[in-house]
């Protein structure tokens, strides 16, 4: 009976996650599915094919007797970075895929879904198989977030700045808290403990010693970042890390991604279209260099990932109703609500920690060992999830990671101070 319950639950989860991906893509025009305006952005139709390839390659092919792949060429097209899964097209060439068509890719998706439904309904899942399907679902949730951010970049770099869809309304605010959350010095445990899904980069529970510190009880806002911009922050080298100053000069950066000054007023592009900037909303689409420069300019610093995790455990042990995720339909960071600390949702928060393995970390065997471990260099850790993250996908120990120059994700930050 317990196995039957588990199978029914995982089947329902599978169908819900797969449907959400198609819902995210529903507002798109066919032309929107194909565009790749920069290397980090993948065309939406590639995402749809890739997450389908994941289930076909890692679940159906090895575990469903008699399964026949939909198209022998698709593994070459939709493999992302799995060396053990065979050859693949260059990432930068994904935008050249006028074929297969969007229609064909949705047929591929339906074919795999039908076989997955049959397999899940008739297979006595072992713990290992259950975990394999679960990681596939979380993998698709990661690509759902990438779909939101990639669609935004595709439309936000279109000179017409077209709207993706209307956003849910937000409660207007006229003031924000300006408090700090203190944490006493001591030894603290870091890493995932307990039940529930987690990625391998969260394992390896270990002790860290933290000195007395405090972190801001909310995220840095647009209004605060405007002060930095208008004070000449992008023209003053002393605020920037050396590599950051090189980035500023090479890109002639003067403000965050999607910001425009029109008739003397700041605007930004959102998935709901071009709008005047709300100064109370958290600033987003800033890279690590920009976050670090603002922190130095303001006389503060960014928290380490360990400081962030412990503060989160202290002050937000559970996810509050006010947390802003993709489920809420805002599709953008919203102002702080009811003193909510914004430790979950709104924006992924840059930390001042390099993405490295924890002590006792062990890379998983097989192809899934390529999921996280091989990227543990030249990247920084972000925490907390964003307005494009699903609510059931996040936890205090979740470690996201991106290169220091990345800004097309919903990335923001809060400040910290040593005491």
Image (cartoon, rainbow, N blue to C red):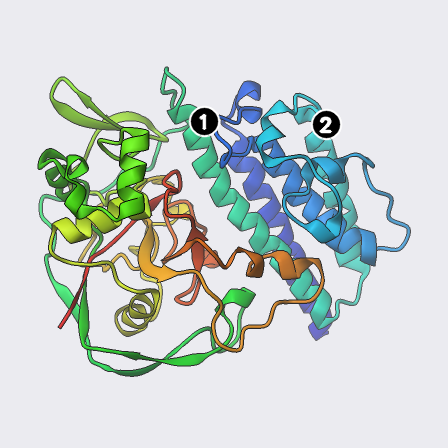
Q: Quadrant of residue 108?
A: top right
- SS class, disc 1: helix
Mark yes or no: residue 251 visible.
yes
What's the residue at 20%, 80% (across, down)? Answer: 184
Q: Which mark is residue 232?
A: none
What's the residue at 68%, 68% (across, down)? Answer: 5
Residue 375, horizontal then vertical, whole percent:
53, 55
What's the residue at 32%, 58% (across, down)? Answer: 351
Q: In screen coordinates, is 210 left or right of 228?
A: right
Q: Is residue 144 above or below residue 382?
A: above
Label 2 sits on residue: 104
Q: Earlier in the sequence, mark 2 or mark 1?
A: 2
Of 318 and 301, which appears nearest the observer? 301
| Label 2 Cα neighbours within 10 Å, binned few <14 / some 14-19 / many ≥20 | few
| Label 1 Cα neighbours within 10 Å, binned few <14 / some 14-19 / many ≥20 | many
Residue 226, horizontal then vertical, whole percent:
14, 37
Q: Quadrant of the N terminus?
A: bottom right
Label 1 sits on residue: 154
Q: Quadrant of residue 319?
A: bottom left
């Amino acid at each position: 009976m317990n196995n039957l319950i588990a199978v029914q639950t995982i089947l329902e989860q599978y169908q819900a996650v797969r449907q959400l991906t198609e819902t995210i893509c529903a507002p798109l025009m066919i032309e929107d599915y194909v565009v790749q305006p920069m290397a980090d952005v993948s065309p939406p139709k590639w995402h749809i094919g890739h997450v389908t390839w994941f289930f076909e390659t890692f679940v159906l092919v090895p575990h469903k007797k008699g399964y026949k792949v939909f198209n022998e060429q698709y593994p070459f097209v939709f493999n992302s970075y799995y060396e053990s899964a065979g050859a693949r097209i260059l990432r930068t060439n994904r935008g050249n895929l006028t074929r297969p068509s969007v229609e064909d890719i949705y047929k591929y998706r339906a074919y795999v879904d039908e076989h997955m439904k049959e397999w899940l309904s008739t297979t006595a899942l072992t713990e290992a198989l259950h975990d394999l399907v679960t990681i596939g679902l979380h993998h698709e949730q990661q690509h759902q977030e990438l779909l939101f951010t990639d669609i935004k970049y595709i439309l936000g770099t279109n000179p017409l700045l077209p709207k993706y869809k209307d956003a849910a309304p937000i409660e207007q605010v006229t003031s924000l808290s300006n408090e700090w959350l203190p944490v006493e010095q001591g030894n603290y445990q870091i890493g995932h403990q307990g039940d529930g899904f987690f990625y391998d980069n969260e394992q390896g529970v270990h002790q860290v010693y933290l000195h007395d510190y405090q972190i801001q009880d909310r995220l840095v806002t647009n209004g605060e970042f405007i002060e930095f911009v208008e004070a000449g922050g992008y023209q003053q080298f002393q605020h920037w890390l050396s590599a950051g100053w090189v980035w500023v000069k090479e890109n002639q950066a003067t403000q965050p991604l999607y910001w425009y000054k029109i008739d003397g007023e700041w605007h930004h592009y959102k998935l709901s279209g071009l709008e005047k900037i709300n100064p109370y909303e958290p600033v987003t689409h800033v890279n690590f260099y920009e976050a670090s420069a603002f922190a130095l300019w303001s006389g503060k610093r960014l928290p380490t990932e360990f400081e962030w995790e412990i503060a989160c455990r202290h002050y937000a042990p559970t996810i509050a109703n006010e947390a802003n995720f993709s489920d809420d339909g805002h599709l953008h960071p919203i102002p702080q609500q009811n003193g909510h600390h914004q430790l979950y949702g709104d924006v992924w928060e840059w930390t001042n920690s390099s993405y490295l393995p924890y002590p006792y970390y062990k890379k998983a065997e097989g192809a899934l060992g390529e999921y996280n471990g091989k990227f543990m260099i030249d990247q920084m850790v972000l925490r907390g999830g964003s307005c494009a993250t699903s609510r059931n996908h996040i936890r205090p120990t979740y470690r996201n990671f991106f290169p220091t120059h990345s800004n097309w994700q919903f990335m923001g930050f809060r400040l910290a101070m040593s005491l």
